[in-house]
Each structure stands twice: as structure tokens, then as C-alpha cells.
Image (cartoon, rainbow, N blue to C red):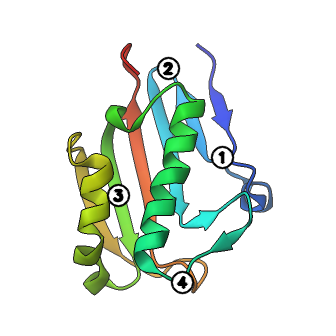
Amino acid sequence: MPRQVISSGSRFEQEIGYSRAVVDGDWVFVSGTTGFDYSKMTISDDLLEQAEQCFRNIQAALSQAAASLQDVVRVTYVLPDAADFPKCWPVFRKYLGEVRPAAMMISAGLSDPRMRIEVQVTARRTSSS
């Protein structure tokens, strides 16, 4: 199966030179995804709304790759403020609580000060997706 790139339509992908996701065989690698609503190029000030939008964006990319959140095997959370991490746990549980992928949280600055969270996932497609 040839390598497939997936775009969200975000201007950032063109400007920076990356894809929202890359499919390689059964593997789907979703880039770090922020809380931007790419259809409107807007971002909420609210941390939990950003976290929800991250997962909506990730779901859209996985869907284009014929995968779903059920296929996620690894997740990385990046938050500029480590104290915000526990506030996000209910959102994480909502989307990945049943899946329970391997996980890591990093506290680091993000490229835009409006961004309060970024989420990256790796999924392995199964026949049940």
C-alpha cells in the first residue's frame, strides 16, 4: 500500500510543510493537533474547549484514514502549563478512556500563545474500524 497523506485544509500545513496525518500500511500517524477549528481558523480561549476540538480534529483525520479513536495505540499530550494537565483528564477519558493507549505528557511552549494544548496520536488500523 502506498504512503497516503491527509490534510485538514489548515493553512499551517502548507506554510510549514507537513500533513495532518500520514498513513503507512496499517499505521496512521496524526501530527500534533491543536484546538483550532480549521474550518473557521479560530481557537477558543477555553482549555477544555480546545481539548475537545483537538479530539474532533483527530477524529476527522483518522476517519479520512479509515481508522478511528478505537485504533489509537499511543497518545502524546503537550501543555505549556503542566498544572492544566489534570483539568483535561475528563476530556481525555471521554475520547480514549475505553481505548487506554500508551500515553505521555510533556510540558513545553507551543508555537502560538493562544494554544493551550496539543495532542498527537498514533493508530493502527484494524478490520473493525
Q: Is residue 82 visible?
A: yes
The x, y position of residue 93, in whole percent, is 24, 55
104 relative to 123 in the view: left or right: left
Q: Is 18 drawn above or below residue 89 in the view shown? A: above
Marks 2,4: beta carbons within 8 A: no
Tell me which residue sits at (41%, 82%) in the image.
80
Q: Is residue 31 visible?
A: no
The x, y position of residue 58, in whole percent, is 50, 48
Tell me which residue sits at (28%, 66%) in the image.
105
- Badge 4: residue crowd in 10 Å (few <14, some 14–19, many ≥20): few
Relative to the observer, which residue lies in front, 125 or 91?
Answer: 91
Which residue type does callout 3 highlight? Thr
Tell me which residue sits at (31%, 45%) in the image.
74
Mark sitting earlier along the chain (3/1): 1
1 relative to 86 in the view: left or right: right
Residue under circle 1?
A: 19
Tell me which residue sits at (57%, 41%) in the image.
61
